[in-house]
Amino acid sequence: MSKKAQDVTSRLTDSSKYTGSHKNRFDDSGKGLGKAGRENLVDYTGSTSSQSRDFGVTKGNVAKSDKPVVSGGLGKEKFGVQADKPISVYFFRNGDKHHTGEKLVMKKEKYRTFDQVLQAATNSVRLTTGPVKKIYKAPELKKVIKSFTDFESNGKYLCCSGEPPASKDKLPTALFQ
């Protein structure tokens, strides 16, 4: 190899003259960094970088740990606000002997006021006498429901529009089963 060819080769292989991303592929002595020099790797410790901690990957910490970031029973323990379980109720039309009932699934998040429950009952049952104003608990039909907490899961309720409950022979048979 000629002297000129040796000068060109030494210039091209001198890592101190590299610029841009190629400069990051070699350490100060000119030795290659391997995978840490070729890829933008991140050390997955769960912390963020700052002036006092730098989580850039160097030749010494290339191997990624498979350990979880958070130790303990994460996912097994309950944290934060837990959602209440919705309840299913069945509403029946007053005075309609053949009505089979309307199922309504209620959540406290959706029905914040009792007026919203009455509106939902009006939309599902569709009384012929007007909107639902009173809801009675079956089978005794003596207790008027006044709040969301009075409802029981899978409970049966009679919807009325201000009038008292009809006689037992005019009420839906499914209400008492």
Image (spheres, rainbow, N blue to C red):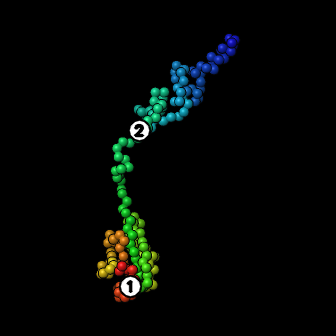
Residue 111 is situated, as x and y percent measured from the top left of the image, at 40, 68
Residue at 63 percent of width and 20 percent of height: 12
| Residue 161 in sight here | no
Residue 132 is situated, as x and y percent measured from the top left of the image, at 40, 79
Q: Which part of the image, by quadrant, shows the C terminus?
A: bottom left
Residue at disc 2, secondary structure: loop
Name the foreground residue: 90 vs 112: 90
Picture layout, residue 16 above or below residue 21: above
Q: Tag on residue 100?
A: none
Residue 131 is situated, as x and y percent measured from the top left of the image, at 42, 80
Disc 2 to disc 1, C-alpha distance: 64 Å
Q: Tag on residue 171?
A: 1
Mark 1 closeness class: few <14, some 14–19, many ≥20 residues within 10 Å: many
Q: Amino acid at mark 2?
A: Lys
Residue at 48 percent of width and 36 percent of height: 42
Residue at disc 1, secondary structure: loop
Residue 124 is situated, as x and y percent measured from the top left of the image, at 45, 76
Q: Earlier in the sequence, mark 2 or mark 1?
A: 2
Residue at 35 percent of width and 69 percent of height: 153
List the residue tagged with mark 2. Answer: 67
